[in-house]
Image: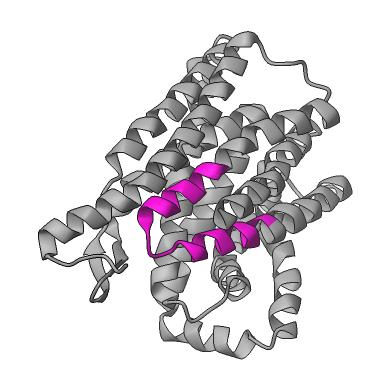
Amino acid sequence: MRPIILGVLAAFFFAATFVLNRVMEVSGGSWIWSASLRYIFMIPFLLIIVIWRGNLKQLLKVMREKPVAWLSWSFVGFGLFYAPLCFATVYSPGWLVAGTWQFTIIAGSLLAPFFIETVQSANGPIEVKGRIPLRGLLFSFIILLGIIVMQLEHASQLSSSSLWLGILPVAVASFAYPLGNRKMMVVVKGRLDVFQRVLGMTIASMPFWLLLSIYGLSSVGVPSVTQTYQSLIVAISSGVIATVLFFMATDMVKDDMQKMASVEATQSVEVLFALIGEMIFLSIALPQPLSWFGMMLVIVGMILHSYASHTGVKRKLELLKKETGMHREG
């Protein structure tokens, strides 16, 4: 239950990303600076935390072991995650981007076969190839249906090209974030804590953010003081607090892809948090009943997905008994 609670708290702080990115876009700020400034600002805060905990030396040692893996998976997990999300706010309101982002739940389930799970048996832990949680995936499609329903209202107001530019980048981000996160957990093998891993991935993704910043300087100029201040808030709320909470939750269930999918499913409530935030800070009108129905489908799908993932643990152990002849403890 604790990983789920941490996941919901992370969703609350993550919602600041969608709200403030939309505020910056409406105010004339560029998505380029919304994306790059967040990660640039994250470094000093995380560096202070890691140094204060006396863990910087260990982090640098682990990063030197596999620098290419750190650079590549951090680019995937942070760069291909956040830049597309910021780009999507140019074409869609924050609450709708947050709703479309829930496709990551399906993406997380589909990624399961690419990882090895550790399962406890009577003879100790054994490693098995991850399986797609079919029952959980079925409920995930309820979430997908909810996302489609939410997009219907928005679709009537946009051209087809603008609609896809608001959807496809989020779809890319939906796969990139869980993939990069899980791959880095495999690389570090439990040797780093959450703060070290987030700092390491932020540092390793910095070449991408610096290149994006250079592009921003040449294309849109320097960011405004207001956008810089708002990006700092995003860095603290979403980049530090939410990311650490979410990584803490995923660390707790890192050896079980079904539980991992359940934790990732908690991010569905971001859409409600983002909607409330935009109503407060942007004075947007309430969505139409069709969009509310879509949001409710997303939330119901999340609950059913979490339940299916929980019950799937028992079925997985029973299947292992038949395949290996092993018996559960107790």
87 left or right, relative to 318: right
- The span shown in magenta is 242-266
Q: Quadrant of the C terminus?
A: bottom left
Q: Is residue 262 magenta?
A: yes
- Where residue 43 sits, quadrant-wise, is bottom right
Q: Residue at x 81, y 48 (%)?
A: 230
User: Does 157 appear above or below 124?
Assistant: above
Question: Which residue is nearer to you in this view: 15 or 301?
Answer: 301
Quadrant in which residue 99 is drawn: top right
The residue lying furthest to the right in this view is 225
Tell me if I can see residue 126 in this picture: yes
Q: In the image shown, does 8 or 58 lie closer to the viewer?
A: 8
User: In the rendering, at what x and y percent does residue 277 appear?
Assistant: 77, 33
Residue 87 position (above or below residue 49): above
Q: Report the front residue among 162 and 176.
A: 176
Residue visible at 58% across and 23% down in the picture? 295
Q: Residue at x 62, y 42 (%)?
A: 86
> Within the image, what quadrant is residue 299 found in?
top right
- 54 sits left or right of 164 in the view: right
The majority secondary structure of the magenta stretch comes to helix
Q: Is residue 234 left or right of residue 163?
A: right
Q: Within the magenta stretch, is there residue 282?
A: no
Q: How many marks?
A: 0
Residue 105: give x, y in percent of width and height. 44, 41
Q: Is residue 222 visible?
A: no
